[in-house]
């Protein structure tokens, strides 16, 4: 089946604007993760969903960042009042199961966010 | 605290050389999982291997092999007879038993294989 998809692939916005990034996980995967990858760094965890609920949002840097997954499938990462420091590639991953599992995470191609 | 260190920032080799990418991890969990991912220039992370903390057997998959040593908290990755298509950034990652499932990544090692 199809892999994880993310839209848009690129997003350029101005400082202070609001953006939404979308993730379509692999069908049937209950676990969904958002990561942020800055240039030259490894991905850093933002938030994890098991089904519809956020099981762990400890990686969100501040209250400008919020994510939802209302029907347990598609997820949207929302960033308010964007800042230049938010510029990064935002990666989404899905997995067949969540905690305690041995399962690998399947990553999408990412959304490259540039805040001018 | 959990941490993954990939001390090699960049490695450059000539095709057909063997190359080893180092990964050292820190965790207080007795059960944990280790992963390697490849990120080619296209950007999408590709899963290569997972290993749980109770399985110290080394693994070989084609030209790839992995050496897991709990005594030194290392999970090194070797590519034999490297090819240009192996050029990518390689990430080692850790997931603790007590975590909610998120991965802790190292900073990655950029491998360049020249013809």
Image (cartoon, rainbow, N blue to C red):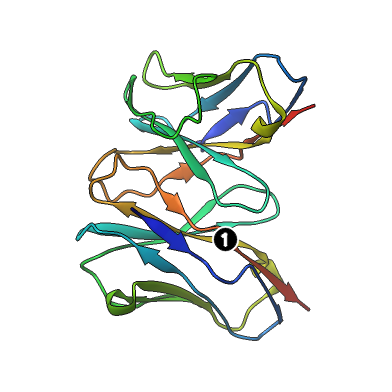
> Is A67 displayed left or right of B39 in the figure?
left
Q: Residue at x 28, y 74 (%)?
A: B70
Q: Residue furthest bottom?
A: B17
User: Could one spot residue A113 in this view of the protein?
Assistant: no
User: Could one spot residue B29 in this view of the protein?
Assistant: yes
Spot occupied by residue A9 in the image (x, y as percentages of width and height): 69, 31
Disc 1 is placed on an element classified as loop
Letter of the chain that mark 1 sits on in the rendering = B
Is A61 drawn above or below residue B61 in the view shown?
above
Q: Residue at x 65, y 31 (%)?
A: A86
Is B34 drawn above or below residue B82 in the view shown?
above
> Is A13 displayed left or right of B111 in the figure?
right
Spot occupied by residue A43 in the image (x, y as percentages of width and height): 53, 46
Spot occupied by residue A39 in the image (x, y as percentages of width and height): 68, 48
Spot occupied by residue B13 in the image (x, y as percentages of width and height): 70, 80
| Nearer the observer, B48 or B22 | B22
Q: Which residue is mark 1?
A: B108
- Picture quadrant of residue B17: bottom right
Q: Residue at x 50, y 30 (%)?
A: A61
> Crowding near pointer 1: few (<14 within 10 Å), some, many (20+)?
many
Is B113 drawn above or below residue A103 in the view shown?
below
Picture quarter with the C terminus of chain B: bottom right
| Nearer the observer, A105 or B73 | B73
| Nearer the observer, A105 or A20 | A20
* Figure label count: 1
> Is B66 displayed left or right of B27 in the figure?
right
Is B21 drawn above or below residue A9 in the view shown?
below
> Is B32 displayed left or right of A5 in the figure?
left
| Nearer the observer, A115 or A102 | A115
């Amino acid at each position: 089946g199809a892999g994880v998809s993310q839209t848009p692939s690129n997003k350029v916005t101005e400082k202070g604007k609001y953006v939404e990034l979308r993730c379509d996980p692999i069908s049937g995967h209950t676990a969904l993760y958002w990561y942020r990858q800055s240039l030259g760094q490894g991905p850093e965890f933002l938030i994890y969903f098991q089904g519809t609920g956020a099981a762990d949002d400890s990686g969100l840097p501040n209250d400008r960042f919020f994510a939802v997954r209302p029907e347990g499938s598609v997820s949207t990462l929302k960033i308010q009042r964007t800042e230049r420091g938010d510029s990064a590639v935002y990666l989404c991953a899905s997995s067949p199961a969540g905690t305690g599992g041995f399962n690998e995470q399947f990553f999408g191609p990412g959304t490259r966010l540039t805040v001018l | 605290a959990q941490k993954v260190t990939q001390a090699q920032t960049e490695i450059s080799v000539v095709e057909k050389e063997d190359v080893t990418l180092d990964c050292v991890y820190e965790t207080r969990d007795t059960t944990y999982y280790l992963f390697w991912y490849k990120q080619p220039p296209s950007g999408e992370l590709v899963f290569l291997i997972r290993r749980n903390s109770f399985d110290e057997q080394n693994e070989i998959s084609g030209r790839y092999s992995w050496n897991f040593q709990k005594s030194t908290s290392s999970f090194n990755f070797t590519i034999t007879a490297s090819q240009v298509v192996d050029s990518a950034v390689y990430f080692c990652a850790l997931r603790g038993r007590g975590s909610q499932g998120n991965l802790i990544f190292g900073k990655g090692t950029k491998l360049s294989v020249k013809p």
